[in-house]
Image (cartoon, grey):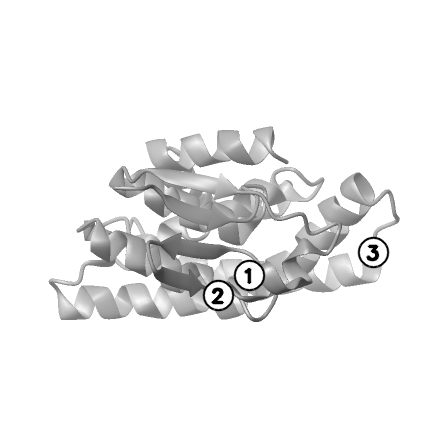
């Protein structure tokens, strides 16, 4: 069977999320580079895979998907992974809750921090907007207060078991550690312990190497 294809680069957080799920199930895959700097993602060949002109896109035979969390669920279901807990209604519901939190709250604060703290100064040679950074660091602190409370009661977000809800956070956390602002997490010991557990996953470690190699 031909390996699945992931369109994008591992340094992109959404691409990294998908790659980690592929590693978790031991699937064969090919990363097909999409050059965002030249606008390749906005050209017809890629728009046919992702009509919003974003990465990743994913191809498994005749099936083409976009949106990294939907792709991740497909991979884990196909690979019969327990990271979705689909044999337990309440546990799978809690995974969905924290995936939504990650998508709509955590990522919304983290994306401007990564863009201003890493992308602009390192990859674009520009100057960070400190006001945007400060505003979103404050948002992140408020979110981390909620996480700290949750993680004082369970080892992982959805319960005492690791799930996609946890692994889905690792790309932004890794990128935060590439900025001068990683110390924002130091005030949250339960969050720090949770992050350490997620980052210790062999699949996550392998994808972090790819993120650094192709960054």
Residue, disc 1: 107
Q: Confirm whether residue 187 shows in the render.
A: no
Compared to 78, does 103 lie above or below? below
Residue 150, quarter of the rendered image:
bottom left
Q: Earlier in the sequence, mark 3 or mark 1?
A: 1
Residue 193, quarter of the rendered image:
top left
Return the residue nearer the eye: 5 or 157: 5
The answer to the question of whether label 1 and label 2 lie on touching residues, with beta carbons closer than 8 A, is yes
Quote the CA–CA distance across marks 3 and 1. 19 Å
The answer to the question of whether label 3 and label 1 lie on touching residues, with beta carbons closer than 8 A, is no
Q: Is residue 203 left or right of residue 108?
A: left
Q: Which is closer to the viewer, label 3 or label 1?
A: 1
Q: Is residue 187 left or right of residue 146?
A: right
Q: For residue 130, which numbered disc appears in the image?
A: 3
Q: Secondary structure at mark 3?
A: helix
Compared to 88, does 124 lie above or below? above
Q: Looking at the image, which residue is at 51% across and 32% down?
A: 210
How far across and down, in percent of the image, does residue 176 sit?
61, 44
Q: Is residue 209 left or right of residue 167?
A: right
């Amino acid at each position: 069977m031909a390996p699945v294809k992931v369109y994008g680069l591992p340094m992109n957080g959404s691409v990294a999320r998908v790659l980690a799920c592929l590693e978790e199930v031991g699937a064969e895959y090919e990363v097909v580079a999409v050059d965002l700097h030249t606008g390749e993602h906005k050209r017809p060949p890629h728009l046919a895979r992702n009509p919003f002109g974003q990465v990743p896109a994913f191809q498994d035979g005749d099936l083409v998907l976009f949106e990294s969390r939907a792709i991740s669920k497909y991979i884990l279901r196909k690979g019969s992974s327990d990271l979705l807990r689909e044999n337990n209604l309440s546990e799978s519901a809690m995974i969905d809750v924290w995936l939504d939190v990650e998508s709509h709250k955590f990522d919304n604060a983290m994306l401007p921090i990564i863009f201003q703290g890493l992308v602009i100064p390192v990859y674009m040679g520009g100057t960070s907007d400190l006001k945007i950074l400060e505003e979103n660091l404050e948002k992140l602190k408020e979110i981390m207060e909620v996480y700290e409370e949750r993680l004082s009661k369970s080892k992982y977000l959805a319960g005492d078991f690791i799930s996609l809800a946890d692994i889905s956070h690792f790309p932004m956390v890794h990128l935060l550690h590439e900025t001068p602002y990683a110390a924002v997490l130091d005030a949250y010991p339960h969050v720090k312990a949770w992050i350490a557990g997620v980052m210790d996953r062999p699949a996550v470690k392998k994808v972090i190497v790819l993120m650094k190699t192709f960054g």
